[in-house]
Amino acid sequence: MSNYKRLHPITAISNFLKELKQLIAPIIIFFFIGRGDHKESIWEYSSMFFMVLMILIVLITGIVKWRRFTYRLEEGELRIEYGLLVKKKRYIPFERIQSLDLSEGILHRPFGLVKVKIETAGSNMTEAEAELTAIKKSEADEIQRIISEAKKSSPKIETNDAPIDFEQSDTIIYQISKKEMFIMASTSGGAGVIVSALLAFFSQFNEMIPYEKIFKELSHLVESGVFLIIFLIVLLLLAAWIGSILVTLIKYNGFTTKQNDGNLIITRGLLERRQTTIPLHRIQAVRITENPLRQLWGYASVYIESAGGSVADKESMNVVLIPIVKKSKIPSILDGTLTGYNFNTSFHKAPGRAKNRYMIREILKVFPVSAGLAIAFWPFGLISIILLGFFAVYGHLRFRSAGWSIEQEQLSLRFRGLLKHTIFMKKNRIQSMMVKQSWFQRKLQLASIFSTVKSSGSGKTSKVFHLDLLDVEKIYQWYRQ
Amino acid sequence: MEIREPQKRISKLALKVWKITGILHSILVWMACAAAMFLVSLFNWSTWFTSIALIIALFYSVLFIFIIPKLRWKRWKYEVREQEIELQHGVFIIKRTLVPMIRVQHVDTVQGPLLRNYDLATITISTAATVHHIPAIDMIEADRLRHSISALARVDEDDV
């Protein structure tokens, strides 16, 4: 595999479409320019001419770009050469390649093609290191095999039957079930917002409108269109909800997490199949996240913070290991894979005297809004005081969630924004630790702890506020040793 | 806090640098204040605006020239030990940071014109995920620090 290779010709078309998308605005402008009254004016034709010319240029660039892009595997490196006017070369040694992400778009499917994204662990990357837009699936598999073989054999002893081993050591850790799919789709973030909006709407509806009167004047209401509008709003919300369900179903269809020889391989997607590979030794921390709706049913998601991946790519920022599963099952699922992590640890909570700090903090956040509303819409604006109550409850929830635990080399922190996060970190993966103490906290013998791990290009900081000062000192000292 | 505090203080000259920065910023604020007064007299607005602008400018100057730099300097402590770097700072909220030496990726010193005038430098310590600053320490000390940190810091490839 040392000769120059090209991407599949479909790349030219996808290049063309991509560029065309950016040109939509100018094309539309050109289209409307010259739509004047003077039908015989030359301008009429010149705008048409420009339009055709622009599309032609884009088409040609797309083709040339495709022709110029070559890749090859040579001397232990992936070598890519490309560039429209300036020839660019990029050589990536196999050892530096963190992962190959394969995905199949709608354009790829009919031809048995895949898109390959090559990730390395560069520190300030804004994009994936290299991308092969469309190559044959078999070829991608071949590349994957060569790279993983090269990585394996370089520092260690070579084994002849490595590829066979490699095939056999595939173990499925998690596969999404129909039921889980359904629960996930109907409780996703978007759906949650819509459902709560619906509920709020209906409760409002309940209090505001006297039903008896409605029934009496139903015909009148229908006439004035109020009923119709309400009906439409409900329909719209319902449609949005179903839409978000569909999106989730398409995105997470067939979600499978496999373990293969020191790598985690995640496959998912209905229209666009994506495959992500994450080396186990790249994992910086493990995070369990529960959104309020799922928490009610005892379900949670598992994410991992990984050192590879590019900052710009949101998909690789937040690697979903398990999109949804009963929270109680998580330890048994992950025990064999993420060895050395203890997901069954018991948490120490924030002391009772911290409760007021949590609640006051949240109340202070909405106080200006509430006060503003009260003044602006006096006296009905006073109803906004209810907001303060909501945020006090929210603060209380945050207080209840706060927790920490240390077990040997593992620090576990638990905290809540809107979502409840539980994060498990190994001491040798924590980049830095910070303790914060405000004047109020000092009086109450409280402090907040901030612990940062590397995640993709940057860092991710877990924050637990208002813990007992002695506890915080314990964590700090634990990190020091 | 009960844990042993870092012992080293940053250069006393930092106080001067911060005061000068405060003065420069104050000048800007006073200019804005003068502009506001001019507008008030031009359009015959209420004199309330004038007094509010004056109070803000005065408050800003006192705070950022006399009070904050002193508090900041008093609180700023650091210590570079063999295994770790520890920082403590913050005027109203005290922040204590611990960075293990093996996490340090590189160390930079930065010197603006003001700092250079006093032979000071800001040290920037970068890990794979975070960046930490020690503002305004003596240039000789900064060089020494940079050397010792970069000598002590080893990056464990596997851990990042």
Image (spheres, rainbow, N blue to C red):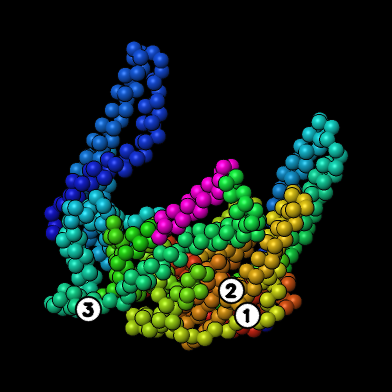
Q: Residue at point 62% right, 69% down? A: A394
Q: Amino acid at mark 2?
A: Val
Residue A281 location in percent, x, y? 35, 75
Residue A159 location in percent, x, y? 16, 78
- Residue at the disc numbered 2: A464
Q: Residue at point 50% right, 80% down? A: A411
Disc 3 element: loop
Magenta part of the chain: A222-245
Q: Residue at point 57% right, 79% down? A: A403
Distance CA(mark 1)–CA(mark 2): 9 Å
Above or below for B22 versus A259: above
Q: Please, which chain is the residue tagged with disc 3 on?
A: A
- Residue at the disc numbered 3: A169
Q: Which mark is residue A350?
A: 1
Tell me if I can see residue B49 in this picture: yes
Q: Residue at point 28% right, 28% down? A: A52
Distance CA(mark 3)–CA(mark 2): 39 Å
